[in-house]
Image (spheres, rainbow, N blue to C red):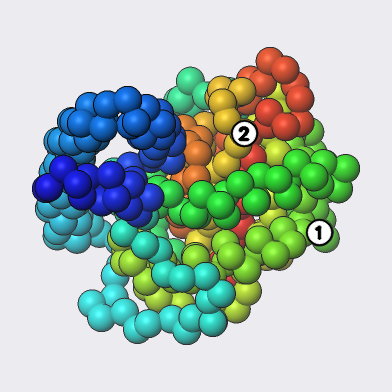
C-alpha cells in the first residue's frame, strides 16, 4: 500500500469491515483524527502512524478470519456427526416454507451462525426421573402438561438442549432505535402472565414468572420478523426441524429487573398455544451492562406420559448484546433470577421474544 493511499483506504476499511466492532472503529477513528490534526507539524509521522495501525489491524483481522473459518469447519463436522447418529425424525428433503415479504435485508456476513451443542444422544426408551439440577426453580408445574394428543404424536420423545444463535442480529442503528423505543415505553409495560391448565388466556402467577412485557413493538416488529424469516431456512436445518407454513408470529418485549425470573416451562404445552413451533429470544440492553444473571437455561427434555421433564442436564445461554437465540417451542427452559443492583427500569435485561406458529 502506498503511503499516500493509507488515510483514505484505512478509513473506508474502518467504516465498512464487519470484523471490527463499533467500539474498535470508534477508537481507531479517534486516533486517526488526532493524527491528522497534527499533520501540519509532521505529515510523515502521521502517515507512518496510519501505516502501523493498518498493519496491526490487518494482523488482528487475519486471526479473527482464521478463527471464524475454523468454527465453520467444526460446525460442519458437528452437524454431519449429529445427523448420522441422532434419532430425531428428519425430512431428507424438507420443502421450503413460504416467506412473507421481508422489509429488512437478509442477514449479512456479520451475522455469524452458531449452533449450541445440540445433543446427539438417542432417546432413552424409558428415562427415569433424575434429581433436579442446582437451579433456582422447582420441578415443572402442572401448566407444562402437553394436552393436545395430535401434537404429542408429532413430537419426539426426547429433545436435547439445542439451539441456534445468531450474533449481531440487528444493525447497530436498529439496535439503538429499539433500545430508545423500549425505554420510552416504560409506562406501557404490564406484568407478565402465564398460561395455566383449564384457564382461558393468561393469568398473573408471581410464583412462576416475574417480569414486565410490552406487546406492541411499533415499527420494530417488521424489522425483527423480517430478519427472522430471512434466517428461518438455515435455522430449521440446523435444529433438524422440518419446514412448516408459518401462520403467525407472536412478538413482545420483556423487561426483567432485580429478582425477576421464569421457572421451568414449555412454550406450547397447552391447547391454546399448541401450534407454537419455534421460540426466539433476542437479547439487548443498555451499555455498560448493569445486571447479571437472567440466563436462558435449555434443558434436555424427555417426555413421560405427555409431560416434558428434565434430566438434570442443561445448556446456559448468558444474555449477550444483539444476539438472537432460536430453539424448539416444546423444549423445557427457564430464566434464572436477574440481579440488577440499581433496580432502574433502564438497566433491565431486555428481550424481544416470541413464537412462530404452524
Up/down of 323 relative to 106, above or below? above
Q: Say which quarter of the image contains residue 288.
A: top right
Kindly identify the residue that appears in the image at 48 percent across and 26 percent down.
132
Kindly identify the residue that appears in the image at 16 percent across and 43 percent down.
3
**Quadrant the C terminus occupies:** bottom right
Q: Nearer the viewer, residue 247 or 133?
A: 247
Residues packed near mark 2 inside 10 Å, few (<14), some (14 to 19) or many (20 plus): some
Kindly identify the residue that appears in the image at 43 percent across and 81 percent down.
97
Mark before the other along the chain sequence, 2 or 1: 1
Element carrying mark 2:
loop
Q: Position of residue 110 (x, y in %)?
A: 34, 54
Question: For this view, does 130 lie left or right of residue 192?
Answer: left
Q: Say which quarter of the image contains residue 91.
A: bottom left
Label annotation for residue 201: 1
Q: Where is residue 290 in the image (x, y as percent from the top left)?
A: 61, 23
Q: Can residue 25 be seen in this view?
A: yes
Q: Where is residue 166 in the image (x, y as percent from the top left)?
A: 40, 52
Label annotation for residue 286: 2
Up/down of 340 relative to 181, above or below? above
Q: Nearer the viewer, mark 2 or mark 1?
A: 2
Amino acid at each position: 500500500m502506498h503511503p499516500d493511499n493509507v488515510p483514505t483506504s484505512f478509513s473506508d476499511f474502518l467504516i465498512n469491515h464487519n470484523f471490527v466492532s463499533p467500539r474498535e472503529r470508534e477508537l481507531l477513528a479517534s486516533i486517526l483524527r488526532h493524527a491528522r490534526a497534527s499533520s501540519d507539524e509532521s505529515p510523515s509521522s502521521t502517515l507512518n502512524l496510519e501505516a502501523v495501525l493498518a498493519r496491526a489491524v490487518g494482523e488482528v483481522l487475519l486471526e479473527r478470519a482464521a478463527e471464524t473459518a475454523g468454527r465453520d469447519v467444526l460446525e460442519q463436522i458437528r452437524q454431519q456427526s449429529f445427523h448420522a447418529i441422532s434419532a430425531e425424525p428428519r425430512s431428507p428433503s424438507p420443502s421450503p416454507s413460504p416467506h412473507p415479504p421481508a422489509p429488512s435485508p437478509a442477514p449479512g456476513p456479520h451475522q455469524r451462525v452458531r449452533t449450541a451443542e445440540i445433543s446427539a444422544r438417542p432417546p432413552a426408551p424409558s428415562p427415569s426421573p433424575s434429581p433436579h439440577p442446582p437451579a433456582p426453580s422447582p420441578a415443572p408445574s402442572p401448566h407444562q402438561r402437553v394436552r393436545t394428543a395430535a401434537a404429542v404424536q408429532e413430537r419426539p420423545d426426547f429433545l436435547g438442549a439445542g439451539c441456534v444463535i445468531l450474533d449481531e442480529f440487528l444493525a447497530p442503528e436498529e439496535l439503538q432505535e429499539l433500545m430508545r423505543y423500549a425505554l420510552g415505553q416504560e409506562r406501557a409495560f404490564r406484568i407478565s402472565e402465564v398460561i395455566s391448565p383449564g384457564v382461558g388466556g393468561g393469568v398473573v402467577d408471581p410464583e412462576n414468572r416475574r417480569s414486565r412485557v410490552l406487546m406492541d413493538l411499533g415499527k420494530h416488529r417488521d424489522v425483527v420478523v423480517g430478519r427472522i424469516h430471512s434466517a428461518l431456512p438455515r435455522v430449521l436445518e440446523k435444529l433438524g426441524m422440518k419446514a412448516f407454513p408459518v401462520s403467525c408470529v407472536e412478538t413482545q418485549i420483556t423487561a426483567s429487573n432485580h429478582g425477576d425470573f421464569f421457572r421451568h416451562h414449555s412454550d406450547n404445552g397447552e391447547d391454546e398455544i399448541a401450534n407454537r413451533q419455534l421460540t426466539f429470544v433476542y437479547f439487548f440492553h443498555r451499555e455498560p451492562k448493569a445486571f447479571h444473571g437472567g440466563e436462558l437455561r435449555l434443558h434436555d427434555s424427555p417426555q413421560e406420559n405427555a409431560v416434558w421433564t428434565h434430566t438434570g442436564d442443561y445448556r446456559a445461554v448468558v444474555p449477550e448484546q444483539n444476539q438472537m437465540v432460536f430453539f424448539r417451542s416444546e423444549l423445557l427452559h427457564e430464566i434464572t433470577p436477574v440481579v440488577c443492583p440499581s433496580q432502574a427500569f433502564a438497566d433491565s435485561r431486555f428481550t424481544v421474544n416470541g413464537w412462530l406458529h404452524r
